[in-house]
Image (tube, rainbow, N blue to C red):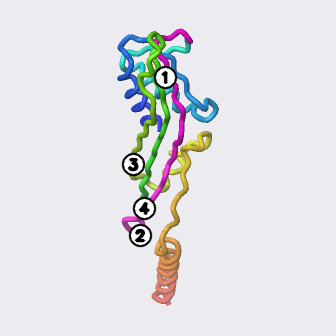
């Protein structure tokens, strides 16, 4: 989410002249605080100067519309291998860029970014941040084989091994 927010900040920086100071407002501040720093980093990386001053030449007003993580396609490549799943992270913001010197609204609209990757199911707890609800997604249910057949096969294999061990010894 932070990388996607950085990309949005970088795209907004293209609307502002190099060397300009810019005031950045992120709403709602109590739940969107985690995207403010990447947006500021995206601006400052292109020779723009973020400030809190109300007298800045430009102002970017960003509202977080949605940020979510979705998991899908739980799969396993072998009986003893770990489970893999697809993860899609998406961020949507509404933004406005104003040039206070002329009063012109340079941009106004929604911006959305998304990214997909494949992760191990065991890494989900490590990748989610309990302090940020938007980073948590719901794991899809596992298929019939993984939830019922696989445990039956494993228990049967152990039972056969124990039976054969005692049968051969006697």
Q: Earlier in the sequence, mark 4 or mark 1?
A: 1
Residue 158 lies, in percent from the top left, at 50, 78
Horizontal arrangement in the rendering, residue 48 relative to residue 142 (left or right)? left
Q: Which residue is mark 3?
A: 116
Q: In this view of the protein, which residue sits in the foreground, 166 or 155? A: 155
**Image marks 1 and 2: residues in contact by CB distance under 8 Å:** no
Looking at the image, residue 2 lies above or below residue 134: above
Q: CA distance from mark 1 to mark 2?
A: 52 Å
Mark 2–mark 4 Cα distance, whole angstroms, equals 17 Å
Q: What percent of the width, then of the height, locates residue 116?
A: 39, 48
Taking the spot 43% from the left edge, 57% from the top edge, the residue there is: 85
Q: Residue at x 54, y 32 (%)?
A: 63
- The Cα–Cα distance between marks 3 and 4, rounded to whole angstroms, is 12 Å
Depth order, front residue of 101/71: 101
Residue 58 counted in the magenta span: yes
Q: Nearer the viewer, mark 3 or mark 1?
A: 1
Circle nearer the N terminus (2, 4): 4
Which residues make up the magenta segment? 54-83
Q: Nearer the viewer, mark 4 or mark 1?
A: 1
Q: CA distance from mark 3 to mark 2?
A: 26 Å
- Which residue position holds label 2? 79
The residue beneath circle 1 is 60
Q: Earlier in the sequence, mark 3 or mark 2?
A: 2
Residue bearing mark 4: 73
Question: Between tags 2 and 4, which lies in front?
Answer: 4
């Amino acid at each position: 989410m932070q990388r996607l927010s950085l990309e949005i900040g970088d795209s907004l920086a293209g609307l502002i002249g190099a060397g300009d100071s810019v005031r950045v407002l992120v709403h709602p501040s109590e739940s969107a605080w985690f995207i403010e720093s990447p947006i500021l980093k995206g601006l400052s990386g292109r020779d723009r100067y973020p400030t809190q001053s109300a007298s800045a030449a430009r102002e970017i007003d960003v509202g977080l519309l949605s940020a979510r993580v979705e998991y899908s396609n739980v799969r396993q490549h072998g009986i003893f291998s770990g489970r893999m799943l697809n993860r899609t992270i998406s961020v949507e913001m509404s933004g406005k860029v104003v040039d206070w010197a002329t009063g012109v609204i340079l941009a106004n609209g929604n911006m959305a970014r998304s990214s997909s990757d494949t992760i191990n199911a065991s890494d989900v707890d490590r990748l989610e941040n309990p302090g940020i609800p938007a980073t948590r997604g719901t794991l899809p249910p596992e298929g019939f084989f993984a939830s019922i057949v696989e445990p039956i096969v494993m228990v049967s294999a152990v039972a056969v091994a124990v039976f054969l061990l005692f049968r051969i010894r006697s």
